[in-house]
Image (tube, grey):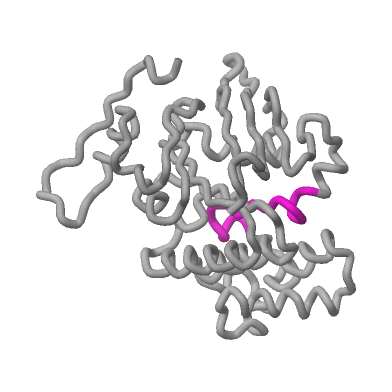
Amino acid sequence: MVERRDPLLIVDGLNVTFDTPHGAVAAVRDVSFTLGREKLGIVGESGSGKSQTGRALLGLLARNGRMSARQLSFDDVDLLRAGEAERHALRGRRISMILQDPKFSLNPVMTVGEQIVEAFRVHAGVSRREARDRALAMLEAVRIREPRYVFDAWPHEISGGMGQRVMIAMMMVPEPDLIIADEPTSALDVTVQLQVLALLDDMLARRGAALIFISHDLNLVASFCDRVLVMYAGRVVETLGAAELHGARHPYTRGLLACQPRVDGDGADLPTLHRDPAWAR
């Protein structure tokens, strides 16, 4: 793991605002963090700004969105000053994003293999045959038993767990330095979820890549990540080591943890999260 003094990514004072018919809405407010070659979890409720933080790093905001920051740099590339061509060269090749649900992320009118080949050729500039061989090797690397069958399959012909493996293969084939995973296992059952996480962890270790893992599942993040950012109303309210998450002090984090169902619970109703307006200031 790269030491914190030599970060791969620096985010300082990130703000994301959306213009709406009812006025400007601040989705991300003054978010700051650094990232080395580690696994950083970002947790919080829906609407807390997790996904918009990840999308802002890639410049993938809706047309009515605006981004600003004091500093936003990736491996000495100034993302605030970078032109669209430079950002386009980074996307996929050096920074990849695994989206939430393969049912909506994969193109339904292209076979699985065509999509992986396209992703690799765009960034590597190799022949179609070389890209096909690399795609098949990557499908095998993500532990798909019949890579040639899946290569020729349509997205609707594969299961959710296999679809998520395909998404990981597609994002990992250019060998990026940073992966942003937005709820990559939320559509999977627990057994497949653990398999996919183990696979992702193994590929990150072999590549030496960094990960931003966006999730609402605090228990999952605590067991999988190195550090955690807790977001509420677009702001980071607490930063701590993943192993320390269950000992968090902020009342919002404590409230989220209390709302998590437990197998060994007493069967009582889960508590309702109390929100203090001061947390959003």
Along the horizontal axis of the image, is 122 left or right of 278?
right
Along the horizontal axis of the image, is 63 left or right of 167?
right
The quarter of the picture where residue 68 lies is: top right
Image coords of residue 188 (percent x, y)? 43, 62
Q: In the rendered image, is residue 166 in sight?
A: yes
Image quadrant holding the C terminus, namely top left
The part of the chain drawn in magenta is 90-105
Task: Identify which residue, 37 or 27, lies in the foreground.
Answer: 37
Residue at the spot 28% in from the left edge and 33% down from the top edge: 255
Question: How many numbered marks, from 0 up?
Answer: 0
Image coords of residue 42 (percent x, y)? 49, 41
Residue at the spot 27% in from the left edge and 31% down from the top edge: 273
Judge whether 194 appears above or below 279 on screen: below
Task: Identify which residue, 8 or 220, lies in the foreground.
Answer: 8
Q: In the rendered image, is residue 15 in sight?
A: no
Task: Identify which residue, 37 or 42, lies in the foreground.
Answer: 37
Judge whether 19 appears above or below 213 on screen: above
Image coords of residue 246 (percent x, y)? 30, 43
Image quadrant holding the N terminus, namely bottom right
Q: Is residue 226 magenta?
A: no
The quarter of the picture where residue 6 lies is: top right
The quarter of the picture where residue 270 lies is: top left
Residue at the spot 52% in from the left edge and 46% down from the top edge: 40
Along the horizontal axis of the image, is 204 left or right of 279?
right
Along the horizontal axis of the image, is 228 left or right of 104?
left
Q: Is residue 103 magenta?
A: yes
Image coords of residue 158 (percent x, y)? 55, 73
